[in-house]
Amino acid sequence: MDDENDGLVPQKQSLFPLSAEDIVDNALQSLDEQQAKEITKKAADEVVKIAVEKRKAEYRSDRAQEEMRNLIHNANLLDEKVGDYKINSTFETATGTTSVEIKKSKTNFTLLIAVVGVVVLLLILIFVFLKT
Amino acid sequence: MLCLVIYLCRKLTLLPPPKALTRSQENANLISVLLELDDEPREQLFKLYKDQFGDSAARYARQTYQKWKAGTVRPNKETFRRFLINLPHVMSFDLKCEVLRELREAYCAHDHYKVTVSTDDWKSTLAPVVEGVMKKAMTAELPASVNRRLTWLAEDDMTAANAILTESEARQTKNALALLEKEFSNIEELLDNARGRSEVTHELRLPLGTITLQIEKGNGNG
């Protein structure tokens, strides 16, 4: 697992003097056999639960990848057919939620060009007027 | 003059001290956290309640629990004692662990970070934030006020339960970070294909914190 995310997960895992195993071991020494059995079982259940959650997360990741590709495909179709559009999508992924906004605004760009054009024209007129 | 300015600044910027909760409000909060249990452990809890306190009390608890949970009805002192002082002594270790999980979820502070990263440098930008979250997951503890009320949390088996849950949260965090590599690969693909038309935000949810990532397209030097 560490190989998959080298540089991200802190390598030194022992952030405090006693590890979880030490604490459980210490607790087990002062408990009866039945309690010790219950604790061991719960620890094993938790490991299984984490593994199941990981598998589910991997599935969500694959599904999100497919949905993102579909989103791009749809945006490309819109690109060919309409000038302006905005798509907001959210994807439930392995580790959380990804929100994507894709937009294209031809109108705004045209408007901007027009405004810049008018301003430049005005400046030229003012310059000519002042010169004469 | 300077003193006056300092006084006015402090007066304007300091928030009023948080109002301490009444004992009854604290009890109500603890009961509502308990009732956040998943269906199966909650059923176990009610069954145990019935075995210990009889049909009539159990019926009332079942009828009222949604109102306790929502806070529309405040449980009385006896209900609190039954659920959170008496019942833990007869609960299975498994059920106590689930109660503890809910308490940790509700009472251990969850941090929220917001970071802007690019697809090239996300690992190095995120590393210190992740380290903080990991450290927190390993050292998170319930507030002293809760530990004082629920003394069964200090028993040896609960020390072990706490260690199991702490380790579990740390492993879940590590798993999430391992999966983030693939997530970023997906997001990079999306940004490449969107050709500058998109804005991407990812909310990374970890057991004891949330990191909101504003993701920008890198220039491929990562």
Image (cartoon, rainbow, N blue to C red):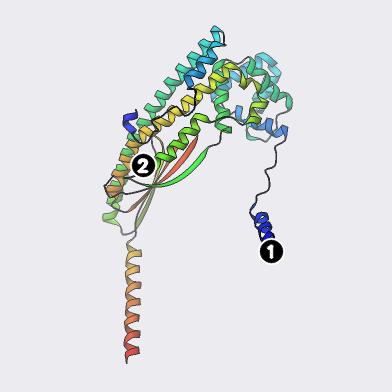
Determine the residue positioned at 68% across, 45% down: B17
Left or right: B138 as drawn, with respect to B2: left
Work out whether residue A48 or residue B46 is closer to the camera in this orientation and state it: A48
Q: Amino acid at mark 1?
A: Met
Query: As drawn, which residue projects farthest toward the bottom?
Result: A132
Residue tagged by mark 1? B1
Label 2 SS? helix
Tell me what residue is drawn at x 66 percent, y 16 percent: B50
Query: The residue tagged with tag 1: helix, strand or loop?
Result: loop
Q: Say the numbered circle drawn on residue B213.
A: none
Residue B54 visible to the viewer: no
Q: Left or right of B176: which side holds B58?
A: right
Q: Quadrant of the N terminus of chain B?
A: bottom right
Quadrant position of residue B98: top right
The picture quadrant where one finds residue A122 is bottom left
Camera-side residue of A21 and B193: A21
Whether residue A81 is visible here, answered yes or no, is yes
Q: Among all residues in the image, which is located at the extreme top?
A: A33
Mark 1 is surrounded, within 10 Å at the Cα level, by few (under 14), some (14 to 19) or many (20 or more) other residues, namely few
Identify the subunit bearing mark 2: B
Mark 2 belongs to which amino acid?
Ser
Residue receiving disc 2 = B124
Please report whichever mark, 2 or 1, sits nearer to the chain's N-terminal start.
Answer: 1
- Disc 2 versus disc 1: nearer the observer: 1
Labelled pair 2, 1 in contact (Cβ < 8 Å): no
The alpha-carbon separation of the residues under discs 2 and 1 comes to: 48 Å
Relative to B5, residue A46 above or below: above
Rendering coords of residue B71 (x, y %): 66, 35
Q: Chain of mark 1?
A: B
Q: Residue at x 67, y 24 (%)?
A: B61
